[in-house]
Image (tube, helix red, strand yellow):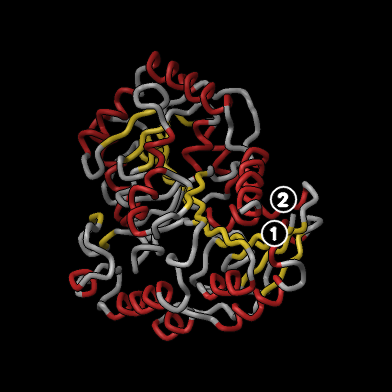
Amino acid sequence: MRIIIANDNAVVSGGATKCALLQAEGLAKLGHEVHFFSGFAEVDPYFASVPGIQFHNCGETKTRMDIPRLIEMSYLQKAYDKLTEIIKLGDPKQTIVHTHLWKTGISPSVVNAALDSGAHLLSSFHDYHVACPQGQFFNKQTNRICTLTPGSVKCLCTHCTDTRTILPKWAEVYRWRVQRGKAGMPGKVRHFGVFSQKSVDAFGQYLPQGAKLHMMHYPIQAVHEPRVDVTKNRAIVISGRLSIEKDPKIFVEAAKKIGAEVRILGDGPLMQAVKDIGYDKATFLGWLSGDQVLAEMKNARAMAITSIWYEVNPLAPIEALGRGIPVIASDCTSTKYEIVEGETGFAFQAHNVDDLADKMKRLLDDETADRMSRAAYDRFWANPPTMENHVKRLIEIYEEMLAE
């Protein structure tokens, strides 16, 4: 099978790019012809050493995403030309083009390149740019989920970005209109890769009639280690960027209400604001590598995700479940769908500090924590979202597309 994976960059910088690179590795190890197309020449050293992946780029230079750059990246002709060239190295009718991110390096011109060349196109969504100009369905001025119709007059007049003026929002709207018009996304596309029911609930209504949604899990580099005995641990942890949409302050405020020990694995613009809460049972570990986060999980009683936007399948909570660590998830997030309420974790109402404190308090009970830990571990390993299972699912999707 011949597969071209297209993504903004080829260096791990977040969950989406890691997913794209892991897909390339998994497919190459099975002997498929794998090409990885990105905007920039730099390649992650680990993946550069994986046999069987051919890396290509369109020679972009990394620069600040200011308004002129946003407009330039609305449709990058050289990305279209380069991807077309790669597709035509083989038989387009037997080629799968699988796109991921396209904001900073390649642009949605890759959609036209795939379709104009006669290749089969699968577009995976890691955010909400397919429907929302800003990409999050989240107003960063009010810190609330946005319910406006994307592209409506009210949407266009609403300042929802974390910038001083509305001008960057209008640049995003311009990009969004080019994406929907000239690039034909989503109107011309039939196959979409999705990672959670929450994301489908958010943008499904904006996809074309007849669209085929292919559900898959993020690939987890999971090692089947013994279950963590959470009854020996006291700290509830959060992991990730300390930013407005993640709402880390509520985590420490809830812990302070019940006297729970907490550990914060991450850094970001709200670090000082969280520290200023002044809770002496909160430990700040700063930004940790993926391996360090996994190591820290061995000391966790539970993990919380407190996001107040429709976050798409963050990896850390899923990895926690695989170690038998119960998860407390905001009802805004896709993680809510990864837990069995009251069995492997709890959901709480976003913005509600008392509800979060109550769910945290329940997990301070040893019997409850142990029961939920065992259930989380057993359920995860009954059908683990490992790289192997993820690639099997990919091949099923690709074969279905090629058979059309």
Rate crowding at label 1 as few (under 14), some (14 to 19) or many (20 or more) other CA atoms within 10 Å: many
Disc 2 residue type?
Leu
Residue ID at (43%, 49%): 312
- Give the secondary structure at mark 2: helix
On the rendered structure, is 122 left or right of 130?
Answer: right
Q: Is residue 144 above or below residue 112?
A: above
Could you tell me if residue 396 is visible in this image? yes
Residue ID at (43%, 65%): 186
Identify the residue under disc 2: 27
Identify the residue under disc 1: 3
Residue ID at (20%, 71%): 158
On the rendered structure, is 238 left or right of 383?
Answer: left
The one nearer the camera, 278 or 32, is: 32
Q: Which-is-in-front pick, marks 1 and 2?
A: 1
Disc 1 residue type?
Ile
Could you tell me if residue 275 is visible in this image? no
Q: Is residue 182 above or below residue 391?
A: below
On the rendered structure, is 222 left or right of 162?
Answer: right
Rate crowding at label 2 as few (under 14), some (14 to 19) or many (20 or more) other CA atoms within 10 Å: many
Tag count: 2
The one nearer the camera, 275 or 344, is: 344
Label located before the other in sequence (1 or 2): 1
